[in-house]
Image: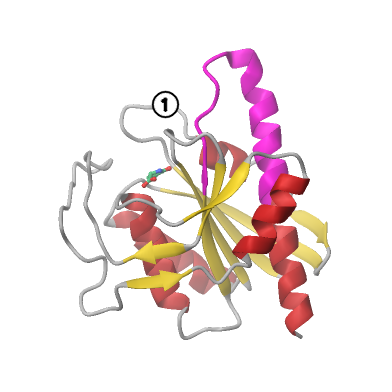
Amino acid sequence: MKVLVTGFAPFGGDTINPSYEAVRRLPARIVSRGGMLDVVTAELPTSFARAPRKLRALIARVQPEIVLCVGLAAERAAICVERIAVNLCDARIADNDGAQPQDKPVVARAPAAYFSTLPVTAIVQALVEGGLRAEQSLSAGAFVCNHVFFGLMHATAKRPRMLAGFVHVPALPLEHTAREAHLVALVRALTIVLNQTSAHIRSRL
Ligand code: PCA
């Protein structure tokens, strides 16, 4: 099973984005409950214009059965498995290209929202059982992450065999010594997300 996992570049003056730091630490192959996963990872620019384009190109190249996008939500304490992508851009800060769209749809004349096609409830349960602080979230915000998430769900809406979704991760601890343990936990969390999703695909076959 082919899997595409993306994280984001640092933004808003940060020098590190834990989403890509965790994503790039994923192994290239994972033995999961759904079989062997071939994992392709990539960094998306924190840019309204460039991120969806890069994601589309990656999907076309990799042809994955699972697409998992990961981003930073610095104000959240838990790992948030996003349930809904909304058709709205309303940026509070400028992206890395200086763009700050407000009150704009992600895709004109598209539906107001899409649900994640990942097994969100099972994923959150598995994360919590794995000792991680996790919850489902009903909003991925209205910045670049939601923009990418909505574009992803719009693109995969007619491809029911491709499961896709979004996970927000909390900020890294300030103390450098605590950072590595935090990243190790995030890698474990992403592995659990992929494991649950692959098991879900398996169960549908
Ligand atoms: N978080 C931002 C964009 C990139 C990222 O990692 C967001 O939540 O929209």
Few, some or many C-alpha atoms within 10 Å of disc 1 (few <14, some 14-19, many ≥20)?
Answer: few
Residue appearing at x 35%, y 71% in the figure: 113
In the depicted structure, whether residue 98 falls above or below residue 113: above
Query: Does residue 185 show up?
Result: yes
Tell which of 26 and 125 is nearer to you: 125
Is 139 in front, or is 106? 139
Verify whether residue 31 appears in magenta. no
| Quadrant of the image occupied by residue 193 | bottom right
Q: Is residue 30 left or right of residue 50?
A: right
Q: Which of the two residues, 90 or 54, is positioned nearer the viewer here?
A: 90
Q: Quadrant of the C terminus?
A: bottom right
Looking at the image, which residue is at 64% across and 18% down?
A: 178
Task: Please tell me whether residue 5 is drawn above or below residue 65 in the rendered image.
Answer: above
As displayed, is residue 17 above or below residue 60?
above
The amino acid pointed to by label 1 is Thr
Cβ of mark 1 under 8 Å from ligand 1: the answer is no
Image label count: 1
Highlighted range, magenta: 168-190
Task: Dividing the image into four quarters, tell me where ligand 1 lies.
Answer: top left
Q: At 28% across and 78% down in the image, what residue appears?
A: 110
Q: How far across and down, in percent of the image, does residue 84 sit?
A: 43, 64
Q: Helix, strand or loop at disc 1?
A: loop
Magenta stretch, main secondary structure class: helix
Name the spot of residue 6 as percent of width and height, x first: 53, 53
Q: Magenta stretch: residue 177 in it?
A: yes
Which residue is label 1 attached to?
A: 15
Q: Which residue is at a point 57% across and 13% down the rendered structure image?
A: 175
Percent across and percent down for residue 167 are: 53, 52
